[in-house]
Structure formats: structure tokens, C-alpha cells
Amino acid sequence: MAYTKVWKDNEKLNKEEKAKLQKDGLDILEDIPRYAEEGFESIPKDQWSLFKWAGLYLQKPKEDGYFMMRVNIPSGVLKYEQALALAAIAKDYGRDVIDITTRQAVQFHWLEIENIPDIFKRLKAVGLSSVGACGDILRTIVGNPLAGIDPNELMDTREIVDDVYWYFQGNRDYSNLPRKYKISISSNINNAQNAEINCLSFVPAVKNIDGKDVVGFHIYVGGGLSAKPYLAEELDVFVRPEQVKDTTEAVTTIFRDFGYRDKRHRARLKFLMADWGPDAFKEKLLEYIELPSKGENRFEAWNAGYFYGVHPQKQEGLNYIGLNIPVGRLYSDELIELAGISKTYGNGEIRTCNSQNVVIPNIKDNDVDSFLRETLLDRLNIEPKNFIGYSVSCTGIEYCNLALVETKERMKQIANYLDEKLSIDVPVRIHMVGCPNACGQRQIADIGLQGIKMKNKDKQLVEAFEIYVGGRLSEDAQFNKKLKGKIEAHHLNDVLLELLKHFKSTKIAGEDFYDFYERTGVDPLQEKLTEIISEKAS
């Protein structure tokens, strides 16, 4: 029985909501075969936005008819056959480009409508889907990339994630949400899931029930980034593993039925939570599902999703190895080679991380040295330098219609420049984004770089950046703060170099950027940036 659209008579619905009342986003899946036969020109412009529900966005410029496709990789667990299928799609249709996203998904570019049905067929054959990877629907589920092999997890969450993911895949009861909806499910104690920036996160917890310690989850609700970021808030409930799907459905139902649909920029779950507060949200949640009060949250230090190097798994005699994928960009032959060595030395799996990197699991002790001699690791390093290894970037103006500036190659070039010019005893996490939507998650970075446009001294509109400092999650979670001053893109290398030289010269040995920021405050960094900008202008 179909659910009741309780918002349908709201006279203040925005235009997107009115359109969704007429046609569900998933209906585009029925139209794509016809559009593929008739060509891009047959697609009405008012249907372009619906392609999001199929995981497709038109690239910039839209009129050229090239699509970006995002493919869901729940928990980041990618099997050998799946990796080969993705590489073949990129090689045949996507000009060899494969990007790993900050939600463990993968993206293709340069796809044409004529090829989409074949791509869907190839994805389905290996158990993958792009449906719901974009649009006002539950997106790919972020999880623990080490699920099942992690010495620092309370339980293996792979089956839980799959259960939730496949329940919501193509589920028309939840295909018309007020806006995009992002969740994470992980039992990693080091918050590899970046829990506080998701709409809904299940995090590791233990509760004593009837004299026994039960392993389960607490939930965080109402996180999100973009132009007005919010940290998710922990609700006073405890969720057993077998209740995760029902709890997800309950929270999603609340979002669907009570989320805002009049102003699209206020349609995310974070705004509902901000207005209701955690106590009122809990009260509403308990109308849908019975949950006890919370137990003990088991989060410890935050690792930001980085797993470089060789590490023992919880299975004796086996190891996982973390590799750097510079700013998340791979090419077809690299993915094929990566899948090959994962098959030779492990079980063929590749695990994607929300740091835009990968982990290869299940490598025997005796095979580690041979694995490390593979030539692919000359580029995909297990011990990257401190800037290229901790740089994150969104897609940028190269493909994205929303971006104001170029980001992906620029971030890689800047990181390599900094590694060449400066050596520091700690990594510095630098995230670059091309627009306020913050797909590159600049708010949680040590140094966030926000792309803008500005007029230079000749009154010409040029690419530029604003700098933010001091972001982190978990204990003392906070978003980074903007420093005053705009930097033209061609000055960014040297400005960052001088700012980081200041960090190096004034930090304590072993002190990371966040601790330095907390100790010294924002003022010294602001004074140094103002000085640097003044010198550049003179």
C-alpha cells in the first residue's frame, strides 16, 4: 500500500517538490532506454534533473550531453569482478577516468546517453547500482572500509549495511525525500565514517542489559555540510544490530513526512533537527520504534579515514595495506592492475575509503614483501608524503556545473609543490572545494580551501580561494573557521607554503595542526596570512 504524501496540499511547496508530485524521480529509469535510442536531443530539459535518481548528472556544459555517473559502493567493499567491470566501463565509455569520492563511491565522466543502458546492464551483472547515488533519496551508505577485518571494530557491519542498502534501493516509499539523505553505519572506534557530518549515523556503543554487555549502536542525527554546516547530535537511544534497518526506516520516515519542502536550501534533515532539538526528535522517533536509552559510546581518536601502510588484521596471519590514490583519481589500467594484485595476494577485494584512498585486505604475512615490490605502488604509495597523502578534492569546474574553480589537478599540484618545498613532522589535512556544496568536505580539514571568483586589481574576474583552519571530528568536534583575505589562484602555492612555514616554525615537536590551532588560536594565523597577502599585493 502506497504511503500518503502528507505534504501534497502545502501551498508553499517549492517548484522541485511540485514537479516530484507529478513524477517520481525513479520513473526516469523507465525513460532512459527510449532516450538512449533517440539520442540526447530527445530529452526535454525539464527532465534533466530527474537523472539524479539514476545516479547521473550532466557535466559542464550541460548542453554538450555528457554525463557524470556515481556508483554506490556500500561500506566501500569492492569485489574483484566489480572492480574489473568499473574499469571496463571507464575504458569503453568514460575516457579512462575513475574518481573515488568522499563517500566511498566511484564516479565516471564523459558518459553519453546511448551507452547508459549497457552500463546499467554491466553494473547489475556484478551486483552494483548507480540508482540513488544522487537525488532526493538515500545515498550510498558510508561504512567502515575495514569491516570484518578490523581489530578496532566492535562488530562486522557488512551484512547490516547491505541489508539497509538493498531495502532502500529502488524503494518508492522513500524515493521522494525533501532533499538528499546521507547515512553511515560503522563499528570502527576511530570514527572512520565521519559520523558527525551525516544526516544519520550509527556509531559503536555498548549497553549493559540484564547484566550483560550488549554491542550495538548509538545514533547521531542532523549532520551535514554545504553553505550552512551542522554537526549531528547524539540521541539518547541504544540500537541493537537487528534494529538498524527499522531505526533507519523510522528516521527516514520522519524526514520524509516532516522535513521542509517549501525552501529547498532548508530541506536537509539538519534543519529539522536544529529546529526540533535531540529531545523532541527522540520523542518522535519512539513513536515509530521502541528503543532503550543509550549506553556507552565507544568512539576514541579520530583517524579521518586514513589507513596507510601494512597493518595486521584481526584474522591471524593476514594483513591489510592502505594505499594513497592522489586526490582520489584513478585510471582504467591502474584499477585493472590494482584488482590483479589484490587477487594475486589477497581475495580480490579493494576497499574504498572516504579519504579517497583504498585498502587491499587479506594479504598473508609471507606475501607482504612481494606485494610491496609491485611497480604500481610507485604511484599508489603506502607511505605518501605529508601533503599529497592527506589532500582531498572535489571534482571541480572540470566536470561540475556548480563549481566556480578548477580543483582536482590544482590540489594535486599544490600538494606536490608543498612536499617538494617543505618537510613537516606531521601530516596536514588539506581539503579543496570548488563551491559551497563542499563535496570535498573542506569544513573538517586542518586547512580548507574554498573556491570563489573575485575581481583582481585589473577588475577582471579570476579564480580565487578563501582559507579556513582548524576543523576536526569526534572529541571536541568543530568546523574550521574562515581567515580574512582572498587569494588569487596563481598565488595559492606560495601563500600556503609561507603559512605552513609559520606553522612549522612555531609548533611544538609532534604537535599536529589542530592541537597547534587550539593552543595558539586563530589570531596568529590570521596575522600571518594578512602579512603574506600584503606582500603579494606590493
Image (cartoon, rainbow, N blue to C red):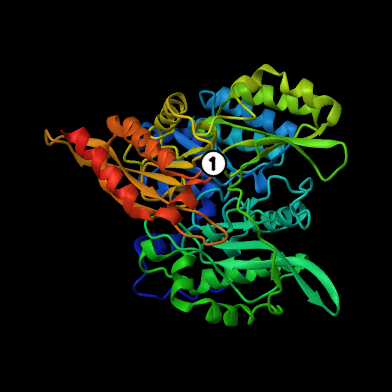
Rendered position, 88 above or below 230: above
- Residue 379 appears in the rendering: yes
- Residue 407 pos. (x, y %): 39, 35
Q: Quadrant of residue 368 in the image?
A: top right
Q: Relative to the observer, which residue lies in front, 278 or 85?
A: 278
Residue 408's x, y, as percent? 43, 33
Name the image quarter holding the N terminus: bottom right
Please state the horizontal and vertical placement of residue 226, each as a whole percent of the image: 41, 55
- Residue at (46, 26) in percent of width and height: 416
In the depicted view, which residue is nearer to us: 357 or 134? Answer: 357
- Write down the quadrant of residue 60 in the picture: top left
Q: Residue at x 78, y 57 (%)?
A: 155
Q: Residue 476 location in percent, x, y? A: 52, 62
Which residue is tagged 1? 101
Circle 1 Cα neighbour tier, 10 Å, few/some/many (<14 / 14–19 / ≥20): many
Tell me if residue 46 comes above or below residue 220 in the rendering. Answer: above
- Residue 128 relative to residue 113: left or right: right
Give the position of the C terminus as an image quadrant: top left
Q: As drawn, is 445 to the left or to the right of 143?
A: left
- Give the total of numbered labels: 1
Q: Residue at x 21, y 41 (%)?
A: 454
Position above or below: 401 against 474: above
Whether residue 58 is visible: no
**What residue is rendered at 57% in x and 31% in y?**
325
Secondary structure, mark 1, is: loop
Name the kind of residue labelled 1 in the image. Answer: Thr
Q: Residue furthest right?
A: 316
